[in-house]
């Protein structure tokens, strides 16, 4: 393995150094001697007529180009409002300095004269990338294209990140593309349809509020299509077959015109390609945001899902999926826009897992460990997911805007598991879980500009959620003696739990902005959060004769709870720009009341609280900043933590709420550095944050063997969390170099068997990669990541390491052939030697498309090395877990694609 990596690294270096290159650098000035920032300098090869190099001047007016020695070029320099420069130039054998002086344009027409496509242009807060300038012909989808652009990444969840920030919105031709998610765009928009990629920094959908709010973390993308893709249907239809009855059907159709757009995506396969996962469903926001993001209150409605098993890197022993989605936009008038989408996903998944779990020492003895469990699990999971959204924006003039959005989410999930648990005793367990939650979220927003000094916004959001999870466990061993009063004369213990949770939550606020000067404004806020929840659950046993034994103890086995939460708040913030600094301090006054009613009585928690927050931005340069944030927030939990009757979490875990819970207080401070240098395409971002949690919500757990019973308390001890993440990326001619690090430390106080237990965790992850981007040569990306997870709980210490080198290769050859390969190698091991596993995955595809035809033929092999399983490790305050997770075998697919 090491030999292969050294060979590939050598290939990267050899290809990068194959031609003799020289550097041309210098400055661009105007006739008065002023240095010009953001001037464009390109070198067009006179033989190939293509752009060999380009540069954008920095704040000192400097540019730099890497050219082939001896080649003849045409150098072109452009800057808005100045006359273009065009010169013939032959690259010498040695580096050379060449300065340019630009004259005023004789008329405005020269400003818009375009005789070539700049690879990158900058227009204020917008960076525009010309897609073809970064392509080599092997790209199939938008994701492939984005990975080659400076500053872009695709994270582990498939979401697009630009300059270290997650993209919050993707548009095509200015129209929303499945608002609230960037994964569907990156994995489905055809690369050959993309003309320009616009990065909209400091994005705000409400033009009246731009500059009044802090939008530095808001990044949106707008995809501009090639001329031949507008006003015509485009896309592709892919079909494939393989051995063992494997199949793939994947049509994608798109239509864009100035008045309306339609996007249709479908995907049916049984080869493990998941276009939409359960994790995607729960994370899919539909563009809805938190109205109280800096108000100082943290109150969110938790999901009552039963913890259905999630896939590891979208892999499982068997996966069958069916997916369909449609997105539309329509403009009835030039003042009114409508948009929306429908998403449906079905999946049937077989999972097989072997798990070893080591529990915390229940007696809290130093260097002692608790019981250990080996568990062998086979699971069949079926899920149906549905989402529907409708949005409307009405803007009769530049001073008034009204928005309305409605999002419906519904799912139907079922999971059946067989668990062989081997601990102090052996227990055969059959678990059955089902749930059909539904939620309806809607918001209405009004923005009105009275005049240059006075701006108003009214925003309201309502959430309705209905959840009905059902749990069943059939066991040989009697579970939770003393809590669940089972009839032990039966052949087994058939325990069932029904639960229903309803939520109605309203968030509303009014903001008034007074623009005192062009560089300062005042913001006054009045708002409220009102929530009502009901929680009902009961546990019962099915006897051998199919009759039902109800457990009637209201305090132990049943819940009938209502919970009301109220937050009335008023806030004030002042924003001012002084030189390179932006200051935005403020505070919010809250009046809280939380009341839970159960067991015939009510318990209330009332509080008046003032919470400050401070935002400071030091804008060193146009694309370089240092930001400081400090905030205090008060956290409230929802009804799930108040319901005192016991509920099952899984076969060896039960939970009981605490009706006397009070709120917790969080202090958070962060420092964020960002730099994006267009001169040498260097992208740097780093963030360090620290939080201290007072009166934090903590689990008080009692452990007996492998069984744990937990409840939530307000801890008397503070918890601390410190984290750092950073990334460095730079382009050297045809090489893209990237490295990054994520380090987090947490110190938590837990209560185990009525005694304090302190746990500490230190997680470290480091990565680096080098990738080529040749237009007429094969490209290779070689990378390596290394992670360490160190967990110490009451003296019981566990340390695991994971090495992951990877290689990606793509090549276009013989006028129509494309070959791509993706290889990942994993080495997972523990410091104590109890685990030491190695496994790898290799996916390849060879395709052929004759030039000027619409048909493409390919053969693809998934898991070419036929790896059977992967390994993983996780930690919690109660136990550490290592597991072996079985995955799909090798699949060979013959595919055919028709491009519309």
Image: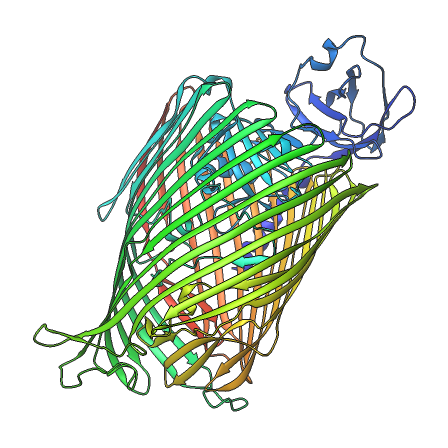
Q: Quadrant of residue 315?
A: bottom left
Foreground residue, 151 or 204? 204
Q: In this rendering, is residue 568 above or below 392?
A: below
Q: Quadrant of residue 308?
A: bottom left
Farthest front residue? Answer: 601
The C terminus lies in which quarter of the figure?
A: top left
Farthest left residue? Answer: 545
Q: Residue at x 10, y 73 (%)?
A: 547
Q: Residue at x 81, y 27 (%)?
A: 92
Q: Quadrant of residue 41?
A: top right
Q: In this rendering, is residue 601 above or below 101?
A: below
Q: 213 left or right of 314?
A: right
Foreground residue, 768 or 634? 634
Q: Residue at x 52, y 91 (%)?
A: 365
Residue 312 seen in the current view: no
Query: Where residue 561 appears, x then y in whole percent?
Result: 35, 67
Q: Residue at x 9, y 72 (%)?
A: 546
Query: Where residue 229 appears, x then y in whole percent?
Result: 45, 20
Residue 748 seen in the current view: yes
């Amino acid at each position: 393995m090491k030999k292969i990596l050294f060979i590939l690294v050598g290939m990267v270096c050899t290809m990068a150094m194959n031609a003799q290159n020289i550097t041309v650098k210098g400055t661009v000035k105007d006739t008065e001697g002023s240095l010009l920032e953001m001037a464009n300098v390109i070198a067009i090869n006179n033989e190939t007529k293509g752009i060999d190099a380009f540069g954008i001047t920095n704040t000192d007016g400097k540019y730099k180009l890497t050219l082939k020695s001896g080649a003849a070029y045409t150098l072109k320099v452009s800057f808005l409002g100045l006359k273009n420069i065009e010169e013939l130039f032959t690259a010498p054998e040695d580096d050379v300095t060449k300065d340019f002086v630009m004259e005023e344009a004789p008329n405005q027409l020269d400003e818009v004269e375009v005789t070539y496509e700049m690879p990158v242009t900058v227009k204020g807060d917008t960076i525009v990338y010309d897609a073809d300038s970064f392509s080599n012909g092997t790209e199939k989808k938008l994701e492939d294209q984005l990975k080659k652009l400076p500053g872009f990444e695709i994270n582990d969840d498939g979401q697009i990140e630009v300059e270290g920030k997650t993209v919050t919105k993707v548009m095509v031709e200015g129209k929303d593309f499945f608002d609230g998610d960037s994964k569907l765009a990156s994995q489905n928009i055809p690369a050959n349809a993309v003309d320009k990629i616009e990065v909209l920094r400091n994005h705000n959908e409400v033009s009246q509020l731009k500059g009044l709010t802090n939008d530095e973390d808001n990044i949106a993308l707008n995809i501009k299509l090639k001329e031949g893709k507008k006003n015509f249907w485009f896309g592709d239809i892919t079909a494939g077959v393989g051995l063992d009855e494997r199949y793939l059907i994947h049509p994608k159709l798109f239509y864009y015109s100035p008045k309306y757009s339609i996007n249709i995506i479908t995907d049916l396969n049984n080869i493990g390609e998941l276009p939409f996962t359960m994790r995607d469903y729960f994370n899919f926001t539909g563009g809805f945001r938190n109205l109280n993001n800096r108000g100082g209150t943290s109150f969110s409605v938790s999901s009552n899902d039963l913890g259905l098993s999630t896939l590891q890197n979208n892999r499982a022993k068997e996966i069958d999926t069916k997916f369909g989605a449609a997105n539309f936009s329509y403009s009835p008038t030039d003042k009114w826009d409508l948009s929306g989408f429908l998403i449906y996903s079905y999946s049937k998944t077989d999972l097989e897992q072997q798990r070893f779990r080591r529990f915390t020492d229940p007696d809290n003895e130093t260097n002692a460990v608790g019981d250990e469990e080996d568990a062998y699990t086979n699971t069949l999971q079926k899920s149906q997911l549905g989402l529907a959204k409708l949005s409307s924006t009405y803007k009769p003039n530049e001073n008034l805007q009204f928005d309305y959005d409605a999002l419906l989410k519904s799912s139907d999930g079922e999971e059946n598991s067989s668990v062989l648990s081997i601990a102090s005793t052996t227990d055969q367990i059959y678990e059955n879980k089902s749930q059909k939650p539904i939620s309806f979220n809607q918001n209405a927003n009004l923005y009105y500009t009275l005049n240059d000094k006075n701006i108003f916004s009214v925003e309201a959001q309502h959430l309705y959620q209905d959840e009905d999870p059902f749990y069943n466990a059939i066991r040989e061993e009697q579970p939770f003696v003393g809590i669940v009063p089972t009839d032990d004369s039966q052949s087994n213990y058939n325990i069932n739990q029904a639960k229903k949770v309803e939520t109605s939550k309203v968030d509303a606020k009014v903001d008034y902005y007074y623009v005192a000067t062009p560089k300062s404004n005042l913001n006054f806020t009045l708002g409220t959060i009102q929530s009502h929840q009901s929680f009902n659950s009961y546990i019962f046993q099915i006897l051998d004769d199919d009759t039902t034994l109800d457990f009637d103890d209201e305090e132990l086995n049943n819940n009938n709870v209502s919970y009301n939460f109220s937050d009335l708040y008023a806030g004030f913030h002042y924003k001012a720009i002084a030189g390179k600094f932006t200051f935005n301090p403020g505070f919010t006054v809250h009046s809280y009341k939380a009341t839970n009613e159960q067991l015939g009585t009510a318990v209330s928690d009332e509080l008046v609280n003032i919470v400050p927050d401070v935002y400071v931005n030091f804008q060193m340069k146009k694309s370089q900043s240092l930001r400081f944030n400090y905030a205090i927030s008060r956290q409230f939990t929802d009804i799930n933590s108040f319901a005192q009757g016991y509920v099952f979490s899984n076969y060896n875990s039960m939970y009981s709420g605490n009706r006397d819970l009070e709120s917790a207080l969080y202090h958070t401070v962060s420092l964020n550095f960002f730099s994006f240098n267009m001169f040498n395409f260097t992208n740097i971002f780093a963030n360090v944050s620290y939080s201290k949690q007072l009166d934090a919500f903590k689990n008080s757990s009692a452990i007996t063997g492998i069984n744990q019973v937990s409840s939530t308390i307000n801890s008397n001890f503070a918890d601390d969390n410190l984290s750092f993440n950073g990334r460095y990326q730079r382009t050297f001619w045809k090489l893209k170099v990237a490295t990054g690090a994520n380090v987090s430390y947490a110190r938590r106080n837990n209560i185990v068997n009525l005694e304090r237990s302190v746990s500490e965790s230190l997680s470290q992850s480091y990565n680096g990669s080098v990738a080529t981007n040749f237009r007429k040569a094969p490209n290779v990306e070689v990378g390596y990541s290394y992670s360490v997870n160190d967990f110490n709980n009451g003296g019981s210490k566990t340390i695991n390491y994971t090495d992951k080198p990877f290689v990606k290769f793509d090549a276009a050859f013989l006028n129509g052939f494309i070959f791509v390969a993706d290889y990942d190698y994993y080495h997972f091991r523990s410091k104590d030697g109890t685990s030491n596993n190695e496994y790898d995955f290799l996916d390849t595809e060879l395709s052929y498309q004759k030039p000027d035809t619409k048909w493409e033929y390919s053969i693809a092999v998934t898991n070419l090395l036929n790896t059977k399983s992967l390994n993983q490790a996780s930690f919690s305050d109660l136990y550490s877990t290592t597991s072996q997770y079985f995955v799909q075998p090798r699949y060979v697919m013959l595919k055919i694609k028709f491009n519309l």
